[in-house]
Image (tube, rainbow, N blue to C red):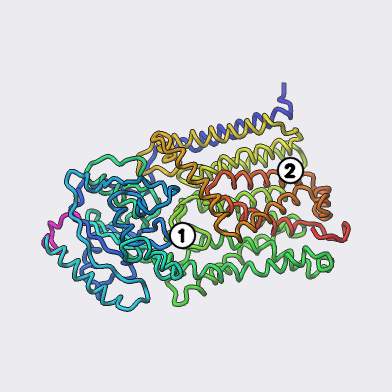
Amino acid sequence: MPVPIRLRPIAMLLALVLSVVALLAAPLGSARADDIRVVPDPVRLLLVTSGLTWEDVSAQATPTLQCLADRSGVAAMNASSTTMVSTRAQGSETIRTGYRGLAAEAPPSAGIPDPPRDLLASLPEPPQVLDLPSVPARGEPGRTAALTELDAAAAEALALSGGCSAADLPRTLLVSVGSVDGPTSETAHAGDALLSETAQLQAVMDSGRPGELLSSGATHQRGVVVLTDVVPTLLAAAGEPIPPALPGQAMTGVADGDAQQIALDRTRAARLVDLATVPALGSWTAPGLLGLIVLLVPALARRPRPAAVARALVTIAPLAIPVGLCAGLVPWWRGEHPVWALTAWVWAGSAVLAAVALAGPWRRWRLGPPGVAGALIAAVLLLESATGSRLQLGSPLGAQAIWGGRYYGLSNHLFGAVLAGSLLALLAALPRLRTRRAHLAATIGTGLVVAGICVAPSMGADFGSMLVTVPTFGILALLVSGIRVRPWHVLALGAGGTALVMGISLLDWLRPPEQRSHLGRFIDAILTGELASVVSRKLAQNIGMLLDYWPLSAAMVLAVVLTVAMLAPGRFRLARLAALDERHPTALPIRIALAIGTWAGFALNDTGAVLVLTALGVTLCLLTAMLPDPEDGPATAG
């Protein structure tokens, strides 16, 4: 007897959950692609400085530091702390406690134990710690002389063990622990106005890993580590257990003949990307804002040629998001004019995607180009994440290595773009499918791909996205099947998403610590009793963003209004949006699902406001391009 159509969505949703588990469980037991090598040799000498970056190290300017780099594993290091610009005082405490910043000054939301425990002193044979001179920030007087002084001090320190070239040089770790010097955090506040010059990736060298490019489980990125990785590295090298509550992980390495060049590339890209992002992305997206004005003003939207140009402009404007994310495909930071180089990449890549969206056979259908643009946005972002997030470091909208946060997978703003892009692609695709079964299959298939890539530890590794994706696409599947959504449906889908993400987190936790993503570390937080602290800290961060930045608060109020208007076009006299719903009955269910996913994402993530604004920004562009002409209804906006 065939399964009734009203029961089939539930069965298919269950199949979705089981399929994702089966898809993701298999690779979790295998090691990452990096050839991780354990180095049991304890660190004997720890050289500490601040302000040193890979742009400073060369055979001419710093021969001793270059000598040490030639026989060491190297990486660019995030030394961010509890203030915008990290200080040497903060970093010096971090390399002893394993936590960011000074415990006595950090806010409770930072999660730093007070008083902290000196894990460095607890080692059976602690390394000898030698403080070397600091280097002033870029552009400050005396920087060249300070580098010379630092190099001489390093030579003197290494001479105690036979010199840098000694065959029996004990394992030495050189760490630049902060961007600026200073006895307290006050120095950092004074430098907030010069962030682009003071906040830089710092240099780290480990002579126990000669010729290797360093990484860690905290970043999963070759050539980038975090200052909080130093203590776990020291503990692992001495054979001591690493407390699971520590935010960092032991550094690993892989042999690479261009290790120092890659560390230098990471440093330059991170320093230049903020300055280059606005002109690169803004120059492409600004015409889209003009297009929005044309399409939303009925008198202008009635004019065929301006309206056609405006639709093209708003359709292609969001394509800068995936192109900007993949800027790592070209070494734009090496150019003589890096801002122009990045801008050229954004325009060239976006033009290619624009040609696909606007020139295909779907161009004759109003929903075609915006739907294809949404599919391209989601597909490129998911593909970059699925292949290991190798392109987003130092790219606009990608992982910003200087400021910390996520270094791999789908950040909240990227998930917002994926959510909006995939759902608007469905809005364009479903009207071309003739049956409810086809609608259901397309919805569940899309949800399966998005959910699988978002939550896989080796891909998106995004805890919150699974909690959002299952209910969002599940409710949409019920709506397009003609089933009235009831409270138990919502509860079941929420429970299913929670069970799925917890199961995958547990599987991730079963891997070796250095291979775990933050999904597995969430299980650590549960086992160590830190769950309440983690949840409260993320909640405080989400609320704090709204309270601390009034423009963001105003934007979120506008986002609420836009969401309500999008769901009730009749009450807001949005005749063209109502006409879209009349022509395409699946348009409203998709917007309902989009609203659910967007605001659930806001509630479940620590930077949920960015998710909301990205999702609604993409939606505003692509949905506006899908609207019928104003002649088809009353002369009202929308």
SS class, disc 1: loop
Residue on which the image places disc 1: 400
How many marks are shown on the rendered structure?
2
Q: Residue at x 35, y 49 (%)?
A: 99
Q: Residue at x 51, y 45 (%)?
A: 462
Can you say whether 342 is above or below 169 in the image? below
Image quarter hosting the N terminus = top right
Query: How far across and down, in percent of the image, does residue 276 sit?
Result: 51, 70
Query: How far across and down, in percent of the image, does residue 75 sit?
Result: 33, 59
Instruction: Indicate which disc residue 589 carries.
Output: 2
Q: Nearer the viewer, residue 198 or 105?
A: 105
Q: Tell me which secondary structure the magenta stretch mostly adopts.
A: loop
Give, as a single range, the part of the protein colored magenta.
161-172
Can you say whether 443 is above or below 208 in the image? above
**Three-letter amino acid code at disc 1?**
Gln
Q: Nearer the viewer, residue 460 or 502?
A: 502
Q: Residue at x 33, y 78 (%)?
A: 141
User: Dot 2 surroundings within 10 Å: few (below 14), some, or many (20 or more)?
Assistant: some
User: Dot 1 surroundings within 10 Å: few (below 14), some, or many (20 or more)?
Assistant: many
Distance between the Cα atoms at labels 2 and 1? 36 Å
Q: Nearer the viewer, residue 187 or 202?
A: 187
